[in-house]
Image: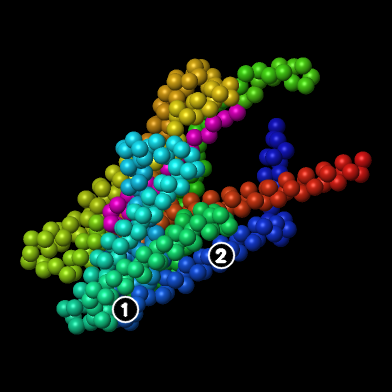
């Protein structure tokens, strides 16, 4: 029999949306923050000629630049203040979390609760500033070297002064995006960092559609290819929605307790374990680790002589790690599988969950509380994580292979992009429904108080 909460949740509709003032304010704040993010992507770095830069970027379009440009919402193409986006922060969080699992002092700091979390976040910010400075320096150096052979100079006054100014501007842009994401999380709807990434990806959707139909109208792309691409996107979206909602529910039994009528009643509950516990983190982490060296080598390689040893190494590295190459897809798939298990171990601790169940008197039928429960939870979680890792790998690698085979530079349909868009959209809609449910509960409480006073 459905509970009162289930009946209310099933009857949620957007007719009550106009009455939820707090929810409307949160949504408007989120939209305003994302509009600010989009405006920043059109503010170029000081000392850069946007017209010449656009011509140079169109000549070097493809591969790692398109992927980075997708995540930054077109900021790299225009060389804006947020050209690096929040990828340095994500890469820094990878390093900090890896260090926390290996270093005893950081592992102890992680267990200190809110204080430890703030300290870890502070270390992550320091790492983000350092990575932004390194990537910004190589980005500025590569920008000066772009078009030097053809006589087209995108930088008005190249030199150390431009590089320092570019690094400072990029650090300021990335830190502002982090602050904006925190404001969205606390005062808006959804996770701010995820929404910023999703907004950058969705902003490239018109370009994706235009390139698709332009290729079809010009004859460079056949109708069969367009049809297969559309069907692939629809199938991937449906598959992502299905797999993200899939979960393994473990039955939790509580001891019998006396009710008000003197009857003994045993409580039952379920412990839901998502099939994909790690969410969109593994593809983002894997792509970030591949973006870091490739971005540095691609922009630094423009200022190196191709005849030198270092220049030949950089050229070979960019060739073997290009999109669609076997080595790139192998490293990408390996990174997704590794971070699926790693991040699942970070967010879910079987021993802690088993201890909490034991303190509350709960147990899994047929499994002894304590250590045996922790072992069983780890056993189940490991096996469902295998399925989740395979699912993430297929979703992310198949589009990469399709793009490489067709030769179409359409990064919007990449598995990582679709995964982020679908997950963030579902999570945001879930939070909106939670606010509407809380609003309906508030109305019920008010009505109950009014009836009580009338009696």
Q: Is residue 211 magenta?
A: no
Q: Which residue lies under the disc numbered 1?
A: 48
Q: Is residue 272 magenta?
A: yes
Is the residue marked by circle 1 packed among few (<14), some (14-19), or many (20+) residues within 10 Å? many
Position of residue 418 in the picture relative to residue 454 (left or right): left
Residue 83 visible, this angle:
no
Is the residue marked by circle 2 packed among few (<14), some (14-19), or many (20+) residues within 10 Å? some
What number is the disc on residue 232? Answer: none
Q: Is residue 392 above or below residue 223?
A: above
Q: Position of residue 82 (x, y in %)?
A: 39, 67
Q: Is residue 163 above or below residue 346?
A: below
Mark 2 lies on a secondary structure that is helix
Which residue: 60% across, 61% down?
27
The span picked out in magenta is 269-292
Which picture quadrant has residue 418?
A: bottom left
Mark 1 or 2, closer to the camera: 1
Q: Position of residue 326 (x, y in %)?
A: 22, 51
User: Viewer-proximal residue, 310 or 223?
Assistant: 310
User: Viewer-proximal residue, 428 or 207?
Assistant: 428
Q: Which residue lies under the disc numbered 2?
A: 31
Q: Position of residue 56 (x, y in %)?
A: 27, 76
- Verify CB contact (< 8 Å) between mark 1 and mark 2: no
- Of all residues, the one furthest to the right in this rendering is 455
Q: Position of residue 50 (x, y in %)?
A: 34, 80
């Amino acid at each position: 029999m459905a509970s009162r909460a289930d009946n209310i949740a099933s009857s949620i509709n957007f007719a009550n949306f106009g009455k939820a003032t707090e929810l409307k304010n949160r949504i408007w704040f989120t939209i305003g923050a994302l509009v600010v993010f989009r405006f920043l992507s059109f503010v170029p770095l000081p000392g850069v000629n946007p017209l010449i830069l656009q011509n140079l970027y169109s000549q070097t379009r493809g591969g790692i630049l398109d992927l980075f440009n997708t995540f930054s919402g077109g900021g790299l193409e225009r060389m804006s203040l947020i050209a690096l986006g929040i990828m340095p922060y994500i890469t820094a969080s990878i390093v900090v979390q890896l260090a926390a699992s290996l270093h005893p002092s950081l592992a102890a700091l992680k267990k200190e609760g809110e204080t430890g979390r703030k300290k870890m976040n502070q270390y992550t910010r320091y790492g983000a500033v350092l990575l932004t400075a390194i990537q910004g320096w190589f980005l500025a150096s590569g920008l000066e070297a772009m078009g030097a052979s053809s006589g087209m100079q995108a930088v008005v006054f190249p030199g150390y002064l431009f590089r320092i100014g570019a690094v400072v501007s990029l650090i300021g842009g990335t830190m502002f995006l982090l602050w904006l994401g925190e404001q969205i999380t606390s005062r808006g709807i959804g996770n701010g960092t995820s929404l910023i990434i999703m907004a950058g990806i969705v902003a490239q959707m018109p370009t994706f559609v235009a390139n698709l139909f332009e290729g079809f109208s010009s004859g460079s792309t056949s109708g069969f290819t367009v049809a297969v691409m559309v069907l692939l996107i629809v199938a991937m979206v449906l598959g992502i929605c299905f797999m993200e909602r899939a979960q393994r529910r473990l039955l939790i039994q509580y001891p019998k307790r006396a009710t008000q009528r003197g009857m003994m009643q045993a409580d039952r509950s379920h412990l839901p374990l998502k099939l994909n516990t790690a969410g969109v983190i593994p593809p983002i982490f894997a792509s970030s680790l591949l973006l870091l060296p490739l971005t540095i080598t691609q922009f630094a390689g423009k200022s190196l002589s191709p005849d030198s040893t270092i220049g030949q190494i950089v050229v070979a590295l960019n060739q073997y790690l290009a999109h669609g190459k076997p080595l790139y897809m192998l490293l990408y798939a390996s990174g997704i599988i590794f971070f699926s298990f790693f991040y699942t171990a970070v967010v879910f601790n079987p021993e802690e969950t088993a201890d909490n169940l034991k303190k509350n008197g709960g147990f899994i039928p047929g499994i002894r509380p304590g250590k045996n429960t922790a072992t069983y939870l780890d056993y189940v979680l490991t096996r469902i994580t295998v399925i989740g890792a395979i699912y993430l790998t297929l979703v992310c690698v198949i589009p990469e292979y399709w793009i490489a085979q067709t030769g179409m530079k359409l990064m919007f349909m990449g598995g990582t992009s679709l995964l982020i868009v679908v997950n963030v959209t579902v999570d945001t809609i879930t939070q909106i429904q939670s606010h509407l449910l809380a609003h309906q509960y508030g109305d019920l409480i008010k009505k109950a108080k009014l009836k009580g006073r009338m009696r």
